[in-house]
Amino acid sequence: MELVIENVGKRYRRDFWGLRDLSLVLEPGVLGLLGPNGAGKSTLMRILATVTKPTEGRVLWNGTDIVHSPESLRAVLGYLPQDFGVYPNLNAVEFLEYMAAIKGLDGRAAHRRIDELLEAVNLHEARRRPLGGYSGGMKQRVGIAQALLNDPLLLIVDEPTAGLDPEERVGFRALIADLASDRIVILSTHIVSDVEATATSITLLNKGHCILHDSPDKILQAVQGKVWTLPVSASELTAIKQKHIVSSTALREDGVHVRVVAAACPDDNAEPADATLEDAYLYYIQATRAPARVQ
């Protein structure tokens, strides 16, 4: 099983490319897509889901060009877009039955699969309630269930944990981990910890370009020894942010505890800290914006 992305680009206007010259080879596992708003993540996922066509380059699913033969991929595709919507007057079972029919699933098999998925996303007790009365997190879980209806070999999910509470996010991470052994999962999210917990590889996009593709361990290695924590007063915080990459702040009794990414120790009171993927993400994004601040 292989998904090959060859020099893919998408142009929206004569002078604006949403994605440019992207090449990746994906095999079973979880690819975490990271990047700021406008980086090209959703554009890439819509191309891979055969919703839109690339302006240049091609995408091959097991050797078949998905632009020329989209059905070769659609039959084994699960897709949860960021703007996923539901029919408010249908309940969860009715909605998933409708989606199963669209996907061409056999009725009896679809009923069994719907029961399994509603249990998996913790909606079985609410399965007969109209979707219009669901919370945002519950609707998101319905979206996850519909993406898994056909037991896809390629699963593409855009901001899947938006609206989920911490316990639901942990459950989603476990579900993705269970799925990833024998299929390709592409996960795009602003919640870096979700990627850190599940991804076997990470692609970092910015301004339509791939600036990094590697394993989480290798990405973390690049910032080990460059992360520090130090207490500062509230009046010193602005100056610290202007001088260094600050990945987090926390208010404590002795002042504001700041987490800084810097090649050298930023202050006599600073102590080294273990790097996280969020530290690495900010480090690489900052490198594309202001290289002089990153060494």
Image: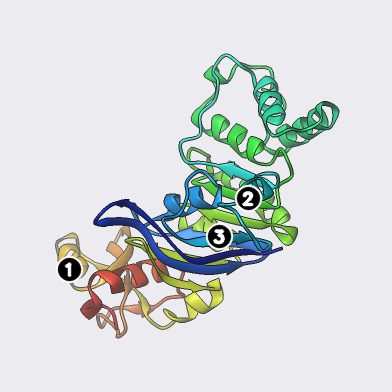
Question: Which quarter of the figure has residue 183?
Answer: bottom right
- Extreme residue toward the right, this view: 108
The correct choice, above or below, for 98 with respect to 5 in the image is above
Could you say where residue 209 lies in the image, as x and y percent from the top left?
37, 66
> Which three-letter amino acid code belongs to the residue tagged 2?
Ser
Residue displayed at 26% across by 54% down:
14
Residue at 61% over, 17% down? 90
Q: Can residue 190 be seen at all in this image of the molecule? A: no
Mark 2 vs 1: CB contact within 8 A: no
| Circle on res. 120 | none
Percent across and percent down for residue 179 are: 71, 53
Q: Which residue is mark 1?
A: 242
Q: Residues within 10 Å of mark 2 (few under 14, many from 20)?
A: few
Q: Label 3 sits on what residue type?
A: Val
Say which residue label 3 marks: 59
Which residue is most to the top? 89
User: Which residue matches tag 2?
Assistant: 69
> Which quadrant, please, contains the N terminus?
bottom right
Can residue 290 be seen here? The reply is yes
Q: Nearer the viewer, residue 245 or 54?
A: 54
Give whichever of 103, 138 is nearer the camera.
Answer: 103
Please state which of residues 269 and 86 is positioned toward the viewer in this rendering.
Answer: 86
> What residue type is disc 1 on?
Gln
Q: Earlier in the sequence, mark 3 or mark 1?
A: 3
Few, some or many residues within 10 Å of mark 1 (<14, 14–19, 20+): few
Quadrant where the C terminus lies? bottom left
